[in-house]
Amino acid sequence: MKKQKMKKKLNIGLNLLYMNRKLSGGSITYGINLVNELALLDNYNNYIIYLNKDCENLPIKIGENFKKKILPFHNNYVYVRYFWEQLLFPFYLLNQNLDVLHSLGYVGPVFCPAKHIVSILDLNYKRHTESMSAFKRVLLGTMVKLMSIFSKSIITISNFSKEEIANELHVEKNKIIVTLLSGSSDVSYVDNSLELDLEGIYEIENEYIISFGSPSSHKNILGLISAFSIFNAKYSQYNLILVGHQHNNSELQEKIINLKLEDKVKFTGFVPDEHIFPLLKNAKLFVFPSFYEGFGIPLLDAQSAGVAVVSSNAASLPEVGGDSALYFDPNNVKEMASKFEMVLNDNDLSNRLIEKGFANRAKFSWHNTAKQTLQVYKDNV
């Protein structure tokens, strides 16, 4: 009887040079969760994780088949990262004998001695130009275009993003693989979440609607506040809680003052991770008003916490939420306000959305993301 031939161990590089400990967001959540799940899933192949000096102690849990390689630069400016990634990083790779390099943050080295896979999560830099300077936008756009040409495969995070990448960057669809994401964590917090003194810590006294208060224009916080003002004229017992700091946005501050909502709209300031789910869980409604999302992790976080969701119908959000959310046009603040009213005046509808939310949330996991990603590595060798 012939012995079964052992499969070759792959040498896989994970390029996390884009990581910045001062920032948060979907790309950071993606990188940390994917690495953690790959470590749980695969103890056979060999991995090298490439990090900048700031991220040496990134909260990743890795096994014996994973090694870290710290490159001696600080990721304070994107230009520094690009300098290292394009001019110096390729020399680090020459003697690593990698089969695959996976660059998780939109951009990797153009000249790569291994099969290069790049994750392009969305094309937000094309859709909402106010979020970055013209120079940064052109630079990022140029680098992403080069990645679409020189990479072996592209990983993205929704079918919406796949269509955008194919159409805007003129990439063959069979080169783009979709690996759906999950929530911030796959741990269930509903039954054993931390009980918070919301009034004492965050000065929340009334029932509330909750959202995340990002300063980026595509998050549509101005529209949310306008919709809340319409809703508040009839239902003044609710507050609007925006998780995060109140940024120095004069237009936002003026809107809150002009609409006389200073006592109604509250920013939490910094919130530790362990407080997010209790804040969500105690809300009467979660609102996701964005004009653009490549995936929509907060929608799944709200559903994990057992809160009804009303969401924008833009971009990938209907793909992620399915029939478990109530949708509105993010450009129509009256329609947005009417959805608040529908859910908060109908306990049966709210409960149905919560139950559908749990079922929808169960469709997504980082284990599946990692399993699909590992298959992409194997398919490219």
Image (spheres, helix red, strand yellow):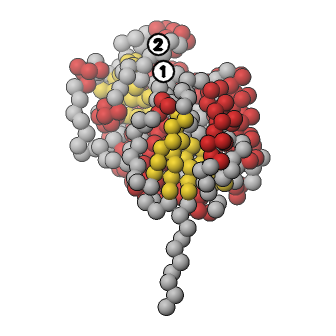
Residue 206 in sight in this render = yes
For label 2, count other residues whose C-alpha is less than 10 Å away and answer few (under 14), some (14-19) or many (20+). some
Measured as percent of width and height from the top left, residue 128 is found at 65, 28
- The residue type indicated by label 1 comes to Ile
Q: Which residue is drawn at 66% across and 42% down?
A: 90
For label 1, count other residues whose C-alpha is less than 10 Å away and answer few (under 14), some (14-19) or many (20+). many
Q: Would you say 36 lies left or right of 168 here?
A: left
Q: Would you say 121 lies left or right of 239 here?
A: right
Give the farthest residue toward the front. 95
Measured as percent of width and height from the top left, residue 198 is found at 26, 25
SS at circle 2: helix
Measured as percent of width and height from the top left, residue 216 is found at 56, 24
Is there CB contact under 8 Å for labels 1 and 2? yes
Q: Mark 1 points at which residue?
A: 225
141 lies above or below 32: above
Find residue 218 and report its image quarter.
top right
- The residue type indicated by label 2 comes to Ile
Q: Which of 69 and 348 is in front in this view?
A: 69
The numbered dot on residue 237 is none
Q: Which of 98 and 14 is in front in this view?
A: 98
SS at circle 1: helix
261 lies above or below 224: above
